[in-house]
Amino acid sequence: MAASLQISGVKTAPSHSFPKQTSFHCRSAFSSQLNVGSFRSTDSYRRLRHCCKSREFKVSCEGGNVDVIERNEVEKSTLGEAKNELTCVMKFGGSSVASAERMREVADLILSFPNEKPVVVLSAMGKTTNKLLLAGEKAVSCGVTKVDTIEELGFIKELHHRTVDELGVERWIVDGHLEELEQLLKGIAMMKELTLRTKDYIVSFGECMSTRIFAAYLDKIGVKARQYDAFEIGFITTDDFTNADILEATYTAVAKRLNDDWNSNPAIPIVTGFLGKGWRSCAITTLGRGGSDLTATTIGKALGLREIQVWKDVDGVLTCDPNIYSGAQPVPYLTFDEAAELAYFGAQVLHPQSMRPAREGDIPVRVKNSYNPNAPGTLITGNRDMSKAVLTSIVLKRNVTMLDIVSTRMLGQFGFLAKVFSIFEDLGISVDVVATSEVSISLTLDPSKLWSRELIQQELDHVVEELEKIAVVNLLQHRSIISLIGNVQRSSLILEKAFNVLRTNGVNVQMISQGASKVNISLVVNDNEAEECVRALHSSFFESELPGLDQCGSAY
Ligand SMILES: Nc1ncnc2c1ncn2[C@@H]1O[C@H](COP(=O)(O)OP(=O)(O)O)[C@@H](O)[C@H]1O
Ligand SMILES: N[C@@H](CC(=O)OP(=O)(O)O)C(=O)O
């Protein structure tokens, strides 16, 4: 039976583009509502096509009109063509590929989705990145002749050899990299220095080896796979070693390379997470710790894929860090804004920048557990029903430095805030949380963002010295930011409950900021009280049976 479908919100559109922020609600003749969401600009057309494709509809945009046709109406040839496109990204973190057994399970997991044509993104095996960094640090002082005795080097060699042996693939797949790694460590030992650029080069061996092993294993079991080093296929970044940003040119370059290869000779792409190539230096860069999530979302946006899956060792994004409280519960739905805020304010589960490409491409991100694939996980999208949402998750960021800055001038002086922020801009320091009055300002400094390095005492002293030219400054260290991620429209309820808990626990909040964020209220407390506060808040918000406190809401 022919289906007539309507798209509300679209009248006519110029070929392959839609009005800004158009909402599409596709409805079939049988009235089964298909809620595709809202899309922007030219990318949107691809997204709409993908959403409909997965639900057995075809979309075309000819002569300014948008047509949605039920798939059984579509000629077979078009269907075949569409079915062959890459469909989603599946990213597996270090914990998911920590051993040969885990790699086998991950391969089975990928193959358990026969309808997917995934781009696979992998991190380094287990704790390899940490071991590589430690090996580099030890090489600085151990002397060239002692490099082969560095414990971490031995560990890395043994882990990768054991893995290839157990998977039954050839050792030469990793031997070249292991030899080069040892040479590099000898170079570091000779120079007695480890630059940020060299650190990025060292850690790149982890992802370069895990992807080669996995691709070889897939080939061995009869699944065509092709390994890619991200820095060779168009991941162009700034030259901020250890914390590089992805540049715009990446999207077209990566899409062209992966699509061209796929179209000419289909094989599952296995791409190194975390790595890029500096646009000036042409050297290997890294995207900051946990950066493989960002690699995955960048590929998702570049190819306009239907979904980005990030497979972890937890049942999704949880109501708080399970290392602080083991009773943390999975959060079923999040918006990109909530997830970004959560990651920025310290939840290790997602890379802080990783939501940006997904949001820009409007591509859903699913956080899943590779150890428990049947668990529903967390679905992150542009919108969700917030009408019942109160609190979604509690996040802790430790070891934060706070500054209380009081103007030495009188009330009514303009330009005070501008001067304060220009000092931070000049020193390249990023500010997290801010609360202001006309003559005073309290703020926290991001501990990891001073030209990509840790904020060190000497630099803090310099900030204070500069600020003291215009203000009285009080430097407060060993503070923590507790971020309450949720529906800030219900801030009175959240704050009432939170302060009740904190008062009962005798905790004094030193700063509070709701800021411009619509999803986050931040509280600053002493480091040594912070974990207990999180546990108490968790118990009050997520474990008490108050009516009307549906913390999670439902999907849009
Ligand atoms: N709110 C949170 N939700 C889920 N996991 C969290 C949260 N906060 C911290 N974590 C930690 O993040 C870990 C998963 O992130 P990560 O180690 O980067 O995964 P992967 O290496 O598999 O990509 C979990 O094992 C958990 O300990
Ligand atoms: N291996 C890198 C990149 C990464 O994203 O790892 P993971 O996915 O295991 O967090 C790191 O440890 O930072």
Image (cartoon, rainbow, N blue to C red):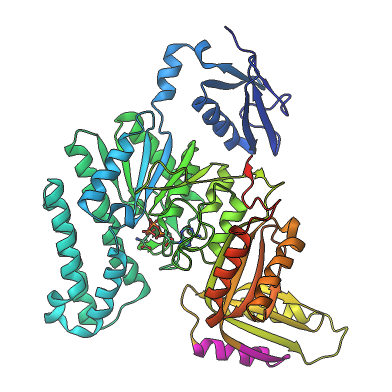
User: In this rendering, does residue 182 appear at all?
Assistant: no
Q: How many marks?
A: 0
User: Residue 59 falls in which quadrant of the image?
Assistant: top right
Residue at coordinates 65% horizontally, 69% vertically from top-left? 522
Query: On the picture, is 368 further left or further right than 29?
Result: left
Given residues 166 and 123, the one toward you in this image is 166
Please say if 322 is above or below 138.
above
Q: Which residues are magenta?
A: 457-475
Query: On the picture, is 318 further left or further right than 90?
Result: right
User: Residue 20 falls in which quadrant of the image?
Assistant: top right
Which quarter of the frame holds ligand 1? bottom left
Which residue ends up furthest to the top in the rendered image? 1
Residue at coordinates 51% horizontally, 25% vertically from top-left? 53
Where is residue 55 shown, x and y percent of the image?
A: 52, 25
User: In this rendering, does residue 102 appear at all?
Assistant: yes
Which residue ends up furthest to the right in the rendered image? 412
Query: On the picture, is 149 further left or further right than 354?
Result: left
Residue at coordinates 61% horizontally, 79% vertically from top-left? 525
Quadrant including the N terminus: top right
Given residues 537 and 112, the one toward you in this image is 537
Where is residue 378 shown, x and y percent of the image?
A: 51, 47
Please say if 49 is above or below 458.
above
- Magenta region includes residue 159: no
Where is residue 310 shown, x and y percent of the image?
A: 43, 48
Given residues 338 and 528, the one toward you in this image is 528
- Magenta region includes residue 465: yes
Quadrant including the C terminus: top right
Query: On the picture, is 460 further left or further right than 143?
Result: right
Where is residue 549 shown, x and y percent of the image?
A: 68, 53
Residue at coordinates 22% horizontally, 79% vertically from top-left? 139
